[in-house]
Image (tube, grey):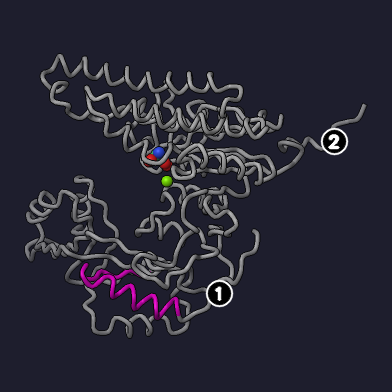
Amino acid sequence: MTANLTEDSSPASGSAIRVLKFGGTSMGGGERILESARLVLAAGGSPVVVVSAMSGVTNQLEALRIGQYAPIEELERRHLEAARTILGEGPGRDGLERAIRARLHTVREGLADREGLAGKDGLEAEQGLAVDPVSDEIRSAGEDLSVLLMTAALSRLGHRARVVDARSIVRTDDRVGGAVPDDDATVELSRHRLLPLVDEGVTPVIQGFVGASADGRTTTLGRGGSDFTAAIIGAALGAPEVTIWTDVDGIYSADPGQIPAARILPELGYEEAVELAYFGARVIHPAAAKHAVGRKVALRIRNSFHPERPGTLIRIDRRGTPGVAALAFKPRVGLLTVRSRPMFMAYGFLARVFEVLTRNRVPVDLVATSHTSTSLTVDRDAPLDRVLSELDAFAEVELQTGMATVSAIGAGLLRIPGVTGEVFRALDDLPVHLISQATDTSLSFVVDEERASEVIRRLHAALIESRPPNPSPYHDP
Ligand code: ASP
Ligand code: MG
């Protein structure tokens, strides 16, 4: 008998786990799902798959109204059609169709329950009012249907795959529509449920976005949360890399709709990715980027419509020399300037200002402060009237709306020789209302919203177009 000398518990004879997440457009119909399944097979190693709902489905579920069942029939048609494309007349089609119908039946029942409740309270049902808010039982249906289709597609291609319900691995608190995962529990559950399957050579297929509270109720992680699921599972399983398959070539140096010369970034450091995600680039969910940062999992963004393209790799530290990687843009910003009233002591003043903002749940992005005043940026759509009247009790307050934030993002950007000079030259004749620099990864400007494109254009030309892409061509981590 051979002794087990190594105590090696690495899965599937040591082949690396690859977590692959497919977004809504990569799951957009039967053909797309088959194509995504082929990408799973091509990935090699031991794949673990996380899927979003088919594009548009979560929106449709959230828009469901009491008494209106036609959208559910439409959802059923779309998923049944995908099932037919995936399996043809092949084995398993009846079962798949039954499972699709059954899940949508529970959505109908969920709505009918609401109708019953509303009926007791009054006329809502007759008036087709919103199911307010739709429950996570309903909201999660899109991902529940997607795992069925992806598993069928993998089987059709001769690959062993099995649905693992995200509710059995992603443990969360019980906030409806925006639950927060319990990291330790999720790590343990993921390993416990997924590794044995992976060891057997079976690919687990898991709903993104969906989880469950400790008492077993369905929860969801907030819109766009499938990326977050993939990052959590990748970290839990110690995967070196998580691939986010989407419908763009990667992360751009600026919005290509606004700046035609914008280019794909081959690599981005974590800090840069987190700053970018918060300051406007919607390619990846900020919580996913943040979670990956904490757990040191690399994320690769790739285009499932062009899998031959390398995409953007987000890793702990970008290689190459410091440089401005990208410009981010946030519209609809309000600039709040506060000064303590003369009869109040300056001591404790800022704490009081932040107390008012926190109590009214108004997040602050940027702060700049001088001896006499403090300026902060807030979301213009936040409940600012209340904030203004509460601040007025102890501060002179001014609110300027019609602002936007433009941020230059790049690790070590202040160490780039001449960079500040270039910035100020580029913005020379444009009014800048606030400059803020809290880390050496971002430098932000508050400008008039109507001048923001001009600011971005000039900064992109001065800081990015004038330099070669960084780092030069793609290497593997
Ligand atoms: N289907 C969910 C949404 O549309 C989650 C996701 O796609 O990431 O928000
Ligand atoms: Mg998404």
Residue occupying image coordinates x 40% and y 41%: 55
Q: Could you say which is closer to the camera, residue 139 or residue 190?
A: 139
**Image mark for residue 79:** none
* Residue named by callout 2: 5
Nearer the observer, 468 or 94:
94
The answer to whether residue 445 is magenta is: yes
Q: Which residues are magenta?
A: 443-465
Q: Quadrant of the N terminus?
A: top right
The location of residue 57, given as percent across then percent down, is 37, 36
Residue 220: where, in percent of width, then height?
39, 33
| Quarter location, residue 128 | top left
**Tag count:** 2
Expressed as whole percent of the image width and height from the top left, the position of residue 282 reads: 38, 54
Above/below status of 303 relative to 20: below
Distance between the alpha carbons at the discs numbered 2 and 1: 44 Å
**Left or right: 422, with 243 as reference point:** left
Please indicate whether residue 17 sits to the left or right of residue 349 in the image: right
> Badge 2: how crowded within 10 Å, few (<14), some, or many (20+)?
few
Q: Amino acid at mark 1?
A: Thr
Identify whether 75 is placed above or below 431. above
| Label located before the other in sequence (2 or 1) | 2
Secondary structure, mark 1, is: loop
Q: Circle 2 — which element?
A: loop
Badge number at residue 321? 1
In which image quadrant can residue 472 be found?
bottom right
Magenta part mainly helix, strand or loop? helix
Q: Does the beta carbon at disc 2 come under 8 Å from ligand 1?
A: no
